[in-house]
Image (cartoon, rainbow, N blue to C red):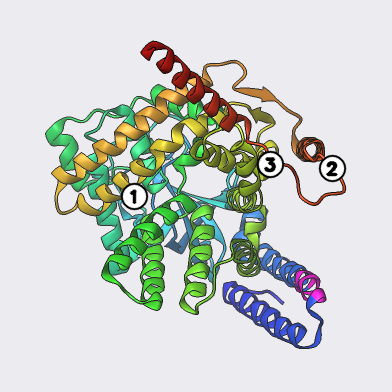
Amino acid sequence: MVMNGDTTQWVAIITLTIFMMLLLIVGMVAPSSAISGTVLIIAILLASMATVSTELVQWHDPASRLARQSETSAVTAAMHIDTPIIVSDLRDADCQTDATLRSLFDGTIAVPSHVAIRLFASGSDCTALAHGAMIQASGILRKARFGKQPLWLVVDGADGTNGTDDTDNTERSLSTPQRTRITVMRRPNPLQQIVGYLQQRFFTVTEQLDDQGRVLVPGLTLGVLGQDYVNIGGINSDARASKTIQPLDEAYTKQVEEQFRRSGIMHLMAVSGGHFMLVADLVRRLCARLLLPRRMVACCVAFAYMLLASMMYPSDSVLRALIMGLTGAGASFIGRRGQSVSALSWTVIGVLLVRPSMAYSYGFALSCAAVLGIVLFAGAVGDWCSVLLPRVIAESLAMTIAAQTLTLPIQVLMEPELPLASVPANLLVSPFVGFATIAGLGSLLISWISPQCGFVLAWVAGRGTQVMERIAAWLSASQYAVVPWAGNLPGALLMLAAEVAFVGICVGFTRAVRRRSIDDPNLPGRTFRPSIRTRIAIWFAQTKALLEREEFE
């Protein structure tokens, strides 16, 4: 039996329903000590079933079969645009976007299809690729050479070259009248149109900043770097024509990306839980001023989460942060204290049941690992660091180290190198991330009504990103910013073993110090002794008092 995309959705719903029913049964009949293990086993089995079902659906989908039969198949497909367009990774196209097929016509018969694809287009065809639209496109269907989408659809070149021109067309004017191969069947819904308009106005403002601001402010705010933005005409074209805005230098943008990557702060250019935490904190402060009840506060926070997620560039980290945030808001609504580990666990289980393809998403894995590391280790690492450092610096350092602890093995799988500059870089930029992010979000919200105020806020965000750029350039210049490491699975296991050994040494050293601090082993507790930092502060205070007394005498 061949399953279609509707079958995939029903399989996901049925597996999730079975999981909840089994969970209720286990909770009623099993002892409390056995519930956790049983739930874990059930979740693994159901996720495996959902994964197998999804893989079978994708394998038997007409688009996948056609791509296996021929390297380049000319087709006409109807599809839904899932992401905003960005600059193409291929040299023979101007823009790209991710989409989900609805039907496929190969010249003989039209059949339903529901596989995810990556669509590449050029010239005026890019203007039709609005996020949320339903379109019909003609092009070449082929297997993906890279990226997370299994198939590519390259729209035929407007000049009849079928997308085989190898020249760099990223700066081609998209408003030039050309023969189009894309037809809009249904426009985006009103909310998506409003979000698209806000984003266009925001990019109009950021294009008036200096080069680093044009690159980094959109990345910090929306999760898409400035050089990846595609000018599809209209607002931004008028701004370019009136103010003669020059295109970004490709060599400079690649240099900035490389500096951020080598210094280990490239994650700042992806929207994550930090954006949601800042917005939630602002909403809670406002609700506290208005003396709103707890349930109303929870609803306001949930609404802010969904509004923020709708304005960001879709990514796996945004999905994780949104679901975790809504889970926490739901817990607050019913009067329960939020539990980060529990919320993360339910988020992972739910996402993998509904979208099993997320199991091999590096972005989703890194986001979950970073959150888990912070929740489990940030407190202990912060207490240990506070012995030698001020509390504010110790907490910031602890957050960075805790997040790196579980993400390093995954980073080694992606690229076999160890980012030694990551911890100092994140520590140095942390004071500037918060206000730069808030200023960028403020510019996004206000640029449509007051471009002047929006520019001021974008300029403020640009001052923060300028500091980040300087720090990244400084630290990445060292030859020891990154060092080679074993790659693939052996490298990840070696990194995990090294971390376990390091933690074991630290724990053993701490316990040895605590044992020596006890004068009498027969007495409970331990002798109170001030920390090294406290003793240094006392020494300076006593020395100052002694010098002042001698000067007075």
- Name which residue type carries label 2: Asp
- Residue at position x 28%, y 45% from top? 178
467 in the magenta segment: no
Name the spot of residue 127 as percent of width and height, x first: 30, 51
Per the image, label 2 sits on a secondary structure element best described as: loop
- Residue at position x 62%, y 18% from top? 480
Q: Which residue is tagged 3? A: 528
Q: Which residue is tagged 2? A: 520
Quadrant assignment for the C terminus: top left
Q: Is residue 534 left or right of residue 180?
A: right
**Dot 1 and dot 2 residues touching (CB under 8 Å):** no
In the displayed structure, would residue 204 be above or below residue 293? above
Residue furthest front as drawn = 553
The circle on residue 125 is 1
- Residue at position x 45%, y 49% from top? 271
* Distance (Cα) linking label 1 and label 2: 81 Å
Mark 3 or mark 1: which is in front? 3
Per the rendered image, the range of residues in magenta is 33-41
- Name which residue type carries label 3: Phe
* Distance (Cα) linking label 3 and label 1: 73 Å
Nearest to the observer: residue 436 or residue 269: 436
Image quarter for residue 394? top right
**Dot 3 and dot 2 residues touching (CB under 8 Å):** no
Quadrant assignment for the N terminus: bottom right
Name the spot of residue 77 as percent of width and height, x first: 47, 62
Image quarter for residue 111? bottom right
How many badges with numbers are in the image? 3
